[in-house]
Amino acid sequence: MAVKTAPAIRIQGLHKAYKQHQVLRNIDLDLPQQRLSVLIGRSGAGKSTLLRCLNGLETPDAGRLCVAGIELSYPDDAKDESKGQAVRQRTGMVFQQFHLFPHLTLLQNLELAPRVAHARLEAHALRRECGELLDKVGLAFHRDHYPSQMSGGQQQRAAIARALATKPKLLLFDEPTSALDPQLSEEVLKVMLTLKREGMTQVMVTHELGFARRYADWVVFLEDGVVVEQGPAAAVFGRPKDARTRAYVSSTPTLPRQNSGAGPSLPRRGRGWT
Amino acid sequence: MKIPTIYLAPNVQRSPPRGELPRPARLRGVARWAVLLLTVASATVSASSMPILRWAGDSEGGAPFIYQDPADPSKLVGAEVELMDLVGAQLGLKPVFVQNQWEGLIPGLDRGDYQVAVNAIEITPERQRQVAFSQPYFVTYEQLAVRRGETAINAVEDLKGKKVGTYKGALAQEILEERGLKPLLYEDIDPLYRDLGFGRLDAVLLDQPIALYVGKPLPDVKFVGDPVGQLAYGMALRKQDGALRARLDQALDRLRASGQLRKLWERWGLWNPLLAAQWHDHRNTSDEPVAWEQYLAARGATETLGQRLQRYVFKFTPLLLQGAWVTLQLSVTGMSLAIVLGLALALARLYGPWPLRWLSVAYVELFRGTPLLIQLFILFYGLPHFGIRLTPVIAAILGLGLNYAAYEAENYRAGLLAVPKGQMEAALALGMSRAQSLRHVLLPQAVRAVLPPVTNDFISILKDSSLVSVITMVELTKVYGELAATYYDWLGLGLLTALLYFLIGLPFVWLARRLETRLHPERQA
């Protein structure tokens, strides 16, 4: 699957260090519109940091970013809270630990940001839309429940619905299934596939290599803060050019990673999702 | 148990600045509380057109000087109350009583809420450096008391090797120490004579009027020996009020010449040879000690259980309820201030720029690390030196609120820090600003976490509010002290007062529980 349109995200010369430790080194990367991109690599490779730089949760030390049409240039914009917020208003993010608001019902979780940060004041229309989003992720009957009453998979699906409620131009996923067992992961990945079909731009950091191999449009492999290799899933997984990529891609399945079971299991029932 | 801490006339004014309360704002005036809030404490109370002489004392001191009439505790009686009526009549002034804690009587003069302090204040060189005194209106001595049946002690000279008690700071302490004795020093009067009865003390040396009114009525106490030492009570006033001082002296001259002053002390059974010598008045005593006898009768009166209950229900309860009302209002307003200010402090500390952060830390450490009592003194007696003269009510609310704000700030800070970091990130990632995230995501979670400790603090402020009696507020504990000093009923009144505190707190505990359930809806499911 090739990149047809202008990139949804353009990263140029991005650097990020924590004290002496260089986490990201000179990252140049374009991620496609309306596609599912996946960042893979070992723990500590810088995947999550890169993802969090995209919506300003982390501030890069240097480099240029263009996310959802907003240009950021570091270090000049490092102090500019409003630019980061502008990016976040146009993007959604899903976290490993869900981070639903425990004091609010699911429906209230969805309504809060549109009402507060996006000035959506027509309560009825908003409620209807949020209800539809919950329906879409299979939680219509749980709209008045609190997060603590739900399973991890349900919470993560609710978190995706919450991110969608602000009508983002793209979604960022930070290891969305790492805290879930295979069955619950499947629920979540299913929702992502629905979004993929609808043409939502998605960027996911994951260790779900099975899922990535099967469904990702664009795969980026990072190691030690550097983009080692990128390309369509078939290329990166099937004919990795770099020895490091080859080592990672081939070694991982032999490591008994629980979650990766979700990948192979998907195609069986997954025909209709793609 | 405290009684006349007071008559004791401590030789040195040791305490830091203290307070006073306009008499009108007292028991009767509790009802005017709301008005007080708006006007400047008590400035306007008398409806009469006669010019006013404001004089201050502490009715908690008890008989014989200023105390509540046992027949009607909302009325004040006592030798000094009568004295001021006489002086007022001489000067064409209407005397208006201002209640203040005894230790605050002299510092309170500077605030200008009253012109004279009259409450068994001994004229000493130390005090004369601070304030001016009228000529003495009463002269008395120290009286030695022993257990009935004691025969070995008949004078101060016999006290060697004996256990002698006296009030801390009284002239008696000085006299005993001059003789190489080491008296046991008490903070309250009542226990002194009681311990004499129990055998913990062999003798008590105290100002004669107190000895007479507190010690003498007890069945196992007897007086022995000659008068010891000499002390004179004067009316204290600001040094710059020379004209008033001259007028008071004239009035006292005339009252003495006319025999009215002598009559007064005779009525109270307090006329003594020292007064006769000092005033060259050697007529034979003519007047019966009517007031003293009345006091004895009231104190010794045996009453039926029905009468007692009646007094509890019809006399004590209404007065205590008025005090409780003041306590409740001060606590609620003080706590409201603390909750709002505490939140601001916590936010400043956690999210503010460094100068604010630093200020917040300093505030918390300062207000948490110093006693509320001292803070109240400074607010009430210290600030007037800088031209800021707070009314008692405002000073009380500010004192409680500013102090508790430090604790509430820490509660909030703990609550905010307990919210997982991911909550803020999730809120930001949704496009909310930092302030919006705080307001809609962090704070609601923090508030429900801090509800139990904040409820705790509310119960605590209810009880701490009793400290504001040092700045002349008459709240529940002060009412209790005054009534107990009048009726010598510490236990029954104490239980009733404790019950009232408990009952005031209950609705708030209940409310907090409801709020907690409400804020944690998921726990109900």
Image: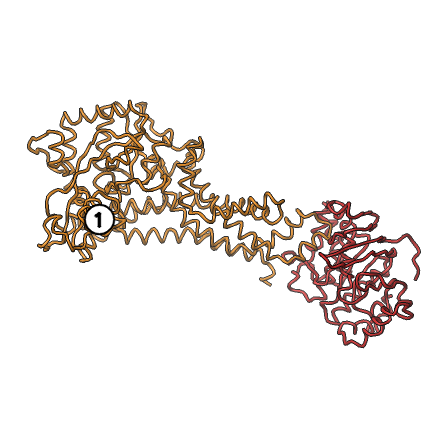
Chain colours: A red, B orange
Along the line of sight, which residue is nearer the eye, A233 or A116?
A233
- Tell me where residue A159 appears, x and y as whole percent: 73, 59
Residue A216 visible, this angle? yes
Q: Quadrant of residue A31?
A: bottom right
Subunit under mark 1: B
Q: Say left or right for A204 vs B358.
A: right
Q: Say left or right for A69 vs B117.
A: right
Q: Quadrant of residue B38?
A: top left
Q: Tell me the residue at 83%/56% (across/down).
A: A26
Near mark 1 (Cα within 10 A), the count class, few <14, some 14-19 or many ≥20, is many
Q: Quadrant of residue A131?
A: bottom right
Say if B437 sits above or below B247 in the image. below
Q: Amino acid at mark 1?
A: Thr
Residue B219 visible, this angle? no
Along the line of sight, which residue is nearer the eye, A133 or B77?
B77
Say if A51 sits above or below B207 in the image. below
Specify the quadrant that holds the C terminus of chain B.
bottom right
- Tell me where residue B79 appears, x and y as whole percent: 20, 36
Along the line of sight, which residue is nearer the eye, B28 or A200?
A200
Q: Which residue is mark 1?
A: B166
Along the line of sight, which residue is nearer the eye, B429 or B142?
B142
Q: Say left or right for A118 vs B82.
A: right
Q: What SS does tag 1 mark?
A: strand
Say if B194 sits above or below B71 in the image. below
